[in-house]
Each structure stands twice: as C-alpha cells, then as structure tokens.
Image: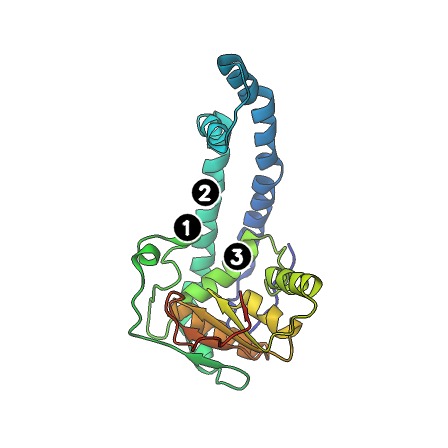
C-alpha cells in the first residue's frame, strides 16, 4: 500500500494497527479485483444462458441483470464480504482515533489561520437525509460529535478513505481533484477561475488540488459537518495550503450570487 502523507491531524497507528490496516487494504484489492471480476464470469456462463432458456431472449434492462445477480449465491457472498470488510475498516480506524482524539482536537485548535480561514455554524440544521443514515457505512456519518470541538469524523474519513481506495488517490487523497483540474484545463483552456467553491468538501482532499492547479484563485469549501470542517482546516494549515472553509448547507449558502466562477 502506498504511504499516506503525514500531517498534523492525521491519526497515528501502532505497528499492530498498521498491520491490520494493511490486511484490510489487501482484502479490498481482492474484493474489488479478481473476486468482483468473477461476477462477470458467473453472469456470462450461468445466469445469462439460464435467462435466455427461460425467456427466449437475453436480459434487456439493467434491472433484469440486477435481479439475476441478487438471487445468485456467488454475488450474494461477494456483496456480503464487500460490506463486512468496509464495516471492519471503519471499526479498525475508529479504534486508532479514539485513543488519541483529545490530542487531535488540541492540535486542530492550535491550527490558527495563517493561510486560510474557518467559519462554523453551531445553529445549522442537519437535514434528515444526512442525519438518518451512515453514508458509506461510516459510523456517525459526517456530522456526529463525540466531544466539544470534535474532529473524529474528519480523522475517520481521511484515514479510512485512504485504506478504502487502497492508496490509489495519492498520498494526500488528491487524485480526484487533480483529475478534475486536468479535465478543466484540457477541455476549457480559456478558463482561469479566480474564485473556486467545492460543495461537500469533507476533509479537503480535492481542495488542495484546486489550490495547486489554480494558484491565482481563492479556494473555498463547504460541508455540513463541523468535525469535517475543523479537521479540513487544520489539515490544510498543516500542509501550508490556503483554503477558506465554512460549515454550510449547499441548498442555501450565505454566499452572494455570482460569487464563484467555478463550482465543483
């Protein structure tokens, strides 16, 4: 597994914790590689021929294909293992954070505003479609706070996503942001944004790529979760990146109309 770049609020792992996390990465590589690809063989060699015999035609819609897979023991087993490993991943990373959470909160509080800025909104209403479900099966989702000035969700997402993606997004998780910047520059070379907003920025993985890709621009990020914003700010400050972060609902921000010329 590629190594994640250390910064001030990235949770540290012991030798045994790193060993377990490396095992989860290897399991993810198997689940998302040969084990997932075998679903194609199961469909081609068994499910599609059986459907053809029973209906006199091949499946004609995505739903018909999905229904076939949902009833198949191999697909059911693959799905169950896929889900279980993801749950174990969050549990493993969560345990590493719990033992050092007060120190991470202290580090985040000491971040200052040397490069960027942070605004929180303690009165913000969390929409039910966020509060009622653990997105990505991540316990507590993006907004749950375990202690005052919490950064747990941010730390969990930062380390957890690195393992989940098997390190393939880069040492700072910047891969998707770099791809976006590259696409914009290749497709719209005339665009030179001066103010950029990322909606749902989480811990700022893509934001840092926008800072590097458009060095003349002011870069902003919003997210509904305070732990995400606190962590993203401390992370960016630690890495010397100027991003302006605020806790907001994307459905109704406090930015004036026409504030940005690039919204991601």
Residue 189 sits in which quadrant? bottom right
Q: Are marks 3 and 1 in contact (CB under 8 Å)?
A: no
According to the picture, the residue beneath numbered tag 1 turns out to be: 137
Front position in the image: 129 or 30: 129
Query: At 43% across and 59% down in the image, what residue appears?
Result: 94
Q: Are marks 1 and 2 in contact (CB under 8 Å)?
A: yes
* Residue 56 appears anywhere in the view: yes
Residue 19 is left or right of residue 258, and the answer is right
Real-space Cα separation, disc 1 to disc 2, in angstroms:
9 Å
Real-space Cα separation, disc 3 to disc 2, in angstroms:
15 Å
Q: Are marks 3 and 2 in contact (CB under 8 Å)?
A: no
Residue 17 is left or right of residue 225, and the answer is right
Residue 177 sits in which quadrant? bottom right
Q: Residue 166, position in %: x, y?
A: 60, 52
Real-space Cα separation, disc 3 to disc 1, in angstroms:
12 Å
Q: Residue 46, position in %: x, y?
A: 56, 20
- First in residue order: circle 3 vs circle 2: 2
Secondary structure beneath label 2 = helix
Secondary structure beneath label 3 = helix
- First in residue order: circle 3 vs circle 1: 1
Please tell me whether residue 164 is drawn above or below residue 250 in the rendered image: above
* Residue 8 appears anywhere in the view: no
Q: Residue 235, position in %: x, y?
A: 52, 73
- First in residue order: circle 1 vs circle 2: 2
Query: At 55% across and 21% down in the image, what residue appears?
Result: 58
* Circle on res. 161: 3
Front position in the image: 262 or 175: 262
According to the picture, the residue beneath numbered tag 2 turns out to be: 83
């Amino acid at each position: 597994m590629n190594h994640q770049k250390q910064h001030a609020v990235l949770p540290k792992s012991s030798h045994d914790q790193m060993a377990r996390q490396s095992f989860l990465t290897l399991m993810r590589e198997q689940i998302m590689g040969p084990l997932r690809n075998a679903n194609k063989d199961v469909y081609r060699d068994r499910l599609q021929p059986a459907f053809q015999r029973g209906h006199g035609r091949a499946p004609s819609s995505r739903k018909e294909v999905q229904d076939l897979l949902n009833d198949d023991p191999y697909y059911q087993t693959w799905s169950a293992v896929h889900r279980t490993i993801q749950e174990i991943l969050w549990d493993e990373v969560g345990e590493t954070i719990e033992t050092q959470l007060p120190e991470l909160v202290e580090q985040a509080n000491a971040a200052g505003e040397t490069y960027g800025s942070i605004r929180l909104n303690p009165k913000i209403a969390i929409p039910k479609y966020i509060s009622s479900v653990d997105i990505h099966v991540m316990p507590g989702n993006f907004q749950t706070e375990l202690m005052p000035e919490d950064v747990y969700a941010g730390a969990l997402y930062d380390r957890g996503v690195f393992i989940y993606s098997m390190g393939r997004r880069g040492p700072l998780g910047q891969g998707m942001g770099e791809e976006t910047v590259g696409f914009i520059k290749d497709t719209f070379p005339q665009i030179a944004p001066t103010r950029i907003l990322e909606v749902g920025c989480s811990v700022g993985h893509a934001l840092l790529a926008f800072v590097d890709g458009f060095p003349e621009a002011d870069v902003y990020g919003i997210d509904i979760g305070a732990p995400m914003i606190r962590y993203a700010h401390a992370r960016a400050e630690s890495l010397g990146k100027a991003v302006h972060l605020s806790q907001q609902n994307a459905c109704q921000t406090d930015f004036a109309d026409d504030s940005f010329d690039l919204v991601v």
